[in-house]
Image (cartoon, rainbow, N blue to C red):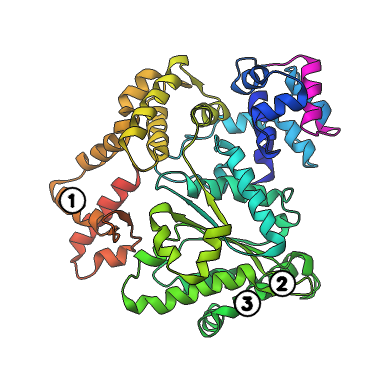
């Protein structure tokens, strides 16, 4: 995330919520530390009280451990006399830039629809601040002793967004895990040949030859920590113009493997077993084997896997200890977190929201969560994105939400709109295209099956290829 992102306009409530989450405090714990009532903290965070008295602000600043100049700016923001974003800038030793609130308000939709939030979306990623800080704390505990961290949860629980828009920006700041702001970071998803994908990413980090890295990983996956250290050292040398080996303190890497279940689904036949096993062995070696004078693991490794693939992971001996000791479960959001996920992005983008709309959406989410075994967060984000499309001036309205189809029908509304815009021939082709992009798991469930356009084109005439493009583009734009 760019440094300026934290300086962008946010409310005092949003600032307080973020600082509390980063301190790993509940509202009750912060209230107790500040000698305030939990209701006072809750009302400030929710914007019921948009400002605080000076003595209240001083108590909160002390409980949060803020030092000058951030402390004084925090009190000013609490009194409504200064930008809340300046507190973050001062705390991190940066100078706030003028006019950034106006820049933020001219941006597009602050909701991601069916796509996960990425690192560049961190300033509009709300509701998971505390969970992201807890994940960073778990990773920090692994920094010294090594080992994989396995992030798991139901499909749609928000694992990808938590990693990309929650964890990665924390690492980029380098505060919770000292030095992580200088470590190269790789965020990847497995392909049919995950070892080649890993080799390509390592080569890009260190300016190395991808084929040579891939060959080394294939021959000796248990020595992947050496390849990773070489890449990290080369990256540090290029960044700091130091001779290789002198930037030892920065010679570590963060490796995040999202949608890890694809190592099982993309190449399920026996021919894929060798590559799959080598990839897993390489990840475990990177996370556990010491390298360099400090004898620390070469990489901090996080894998995210759907909960219904837990048995597949447990059948791999190298992953058992990670599942026993390094598992981090992403559960459903609480109602207060959902409320923030609804209102926070709107506030960050300078949008108003009808008072009754949030409660309507929360009620719809309760119903949807009872009717679905998978997470409802993609449905919420899609509903909010479509509500934004139907906004009235700079306001999200109940009428626009109804036009979007609500939480239960937002995806169907967008899909129907895309399908109706296709020609008759393209409509006939669409089911086969979409079917080729999914794969059935052993228990009868479905998972993503990433394919290239060339995969879909195979053996088809040029006219049909054009129709495939039209189908893909229509649904990708939903």
- The residue furthest right is 68
Foreground residue among 221 and 189: 221
Determine the CA span between mark 2 and mark 3: 10 Å
Residue at horizontal 42%, vertical 52%?
307
Q: Residue 469: give x, y in percent of width and height.
A: 27, 55
Residue 292: quadrant of the picture:
bottom right
Q: Which of label 1 and label 2 is nearer to you?
A: 2
User: Magenta span covers which residues?
Assistant: 51-70
Give the alpha-carbon distance from disc 1 to disc 2, as whole Å. 51 Å
Indicate the position of residue 125 as horizontal and vertical percent values: 55, 38
Q: Does the magenta segment cover residue 64?
A: yes
Is 305 drawn above or below residue 387 in the view shown? below
Q: Residue at x 74, y 32 (%)?
A: 86
Residue 94 lies in magenta, yes or no?
no
In the picture of the structure, the residue carrying the numbered disc 1 is 426
Q: Residue at label 3?
A: 227
Tell me the SS state at disc 3.
helix
In the image, residue 77 sits, relative to residue 268, either above or below, namely above
Say the numbered circle drawn on residue 233: 2
Q: Nearer the viewer, mark 1 or mark 3?
A: 3
Q: Position of residue 359 (x, y in %)?
A: 44, 20
Element marked by disc 1? helix
Binning the other alpha carbons within 10 Å of mark 1 as few (below 14), some (14 to 19) or many (20 upward) gives some
Q: Is residue 129 left or right of residue 66?
A: left
Identify the residue shown where x is 39% and y is 20%: 360
Q: Are marks 1 and 2 in contact (CB under 8 Å)?
A: no
């Amino acid at each position: 995330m760019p440094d300026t992102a934290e300086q962008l306009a946010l409310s005092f409530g949003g600032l307080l919520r973020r600082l509390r989450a980063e301190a790993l405090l509940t509202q009750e714990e912060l209230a107790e530390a500040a000698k305030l009532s939990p209701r006072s903290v809750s009302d400030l965070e929710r914007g019921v009280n948009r400002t605080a008295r000076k003595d209240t602000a001083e108590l909160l600043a002390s409980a949060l451990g803020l030092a000058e100049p951030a402390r004084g700016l925090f009190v000013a923001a609490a009194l409504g006399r200064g930008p809340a974003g300046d507190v973050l800038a001062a705390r991190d030793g940066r100078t706030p830039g003028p006019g950034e609130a106006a820049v933020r308000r001219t941006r597009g939709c602050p909701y991601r629809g069916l796509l996960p939030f990425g690192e560049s979306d961190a300033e509009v990623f709300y509701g998971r601040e505390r969970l992201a800080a807890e994940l960073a704390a778990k990773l920090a505990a692994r920094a010294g002793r090594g080992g994989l961290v396995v992030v798991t949860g139901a499909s749609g629980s928000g694992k990808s967004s938590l990693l990309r828009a929650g964890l990665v920006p924390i690492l980029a700041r380098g505060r919770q895990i000292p030095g992580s702001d200088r470590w190269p970071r790789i965020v990847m998803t497995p392909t049919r040949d995950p070892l080649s994908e890993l080799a390509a990413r390592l080569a890009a980090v260190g300016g190395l030859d991808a084929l040579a890295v891939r060959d080394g990983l294939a021959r000796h996956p248990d020595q992947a920590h050496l390849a990773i250290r070489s890449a990290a050292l080369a990256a540090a040398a290029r960044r700091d113009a130091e001779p290789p080996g002198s930037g030892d303190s920065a010679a570590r890497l963060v490796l995040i493997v999202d949608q890890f279940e694809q190592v099982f689904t993309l190449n399920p036949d026996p021919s894929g077993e060798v590559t799959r096993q080598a990839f897993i062995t390489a990840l475990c070696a990177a996370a556990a084997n010491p390298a360099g004078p400090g004898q620390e693991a070469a990489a901090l490794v996080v894998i995210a896997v759907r909960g219904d693939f837990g048995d597949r992971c447990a059948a791999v001996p190298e992953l058992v200890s990670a599942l026993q000791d390094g598992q981090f479960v992403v559960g459903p959001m609480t109602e207060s977190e959902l409320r923030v996920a609804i209102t926070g992005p709107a506030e960050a983008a300078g949008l108003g929201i009808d008072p009754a709309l949030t409660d309507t959406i929360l009620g719809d989410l309760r119903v949807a969560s009872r009717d679905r075994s998978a997470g409802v967060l993609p449905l919420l984000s899609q509903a909010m994105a479509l509500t934004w499309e139907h906004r009235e001036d700079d306001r999200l309205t109940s009428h626009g939400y109804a036009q979007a189809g609500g939480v239960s029908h937002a995806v169907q509304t967008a899909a129907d709109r895309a399908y109706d815009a296709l020609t008759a021939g393209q409509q006939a082709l669409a089911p086969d295209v979409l079917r080729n992009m999914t794969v059935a798991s052993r228990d009868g469930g479905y998972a993503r099956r990433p394919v290239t356009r060339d995969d879909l084109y195979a053996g088809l005439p040029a006219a049909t290829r054009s129709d495939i493009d039209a189908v893909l583009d229509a649904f990708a734009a939903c």
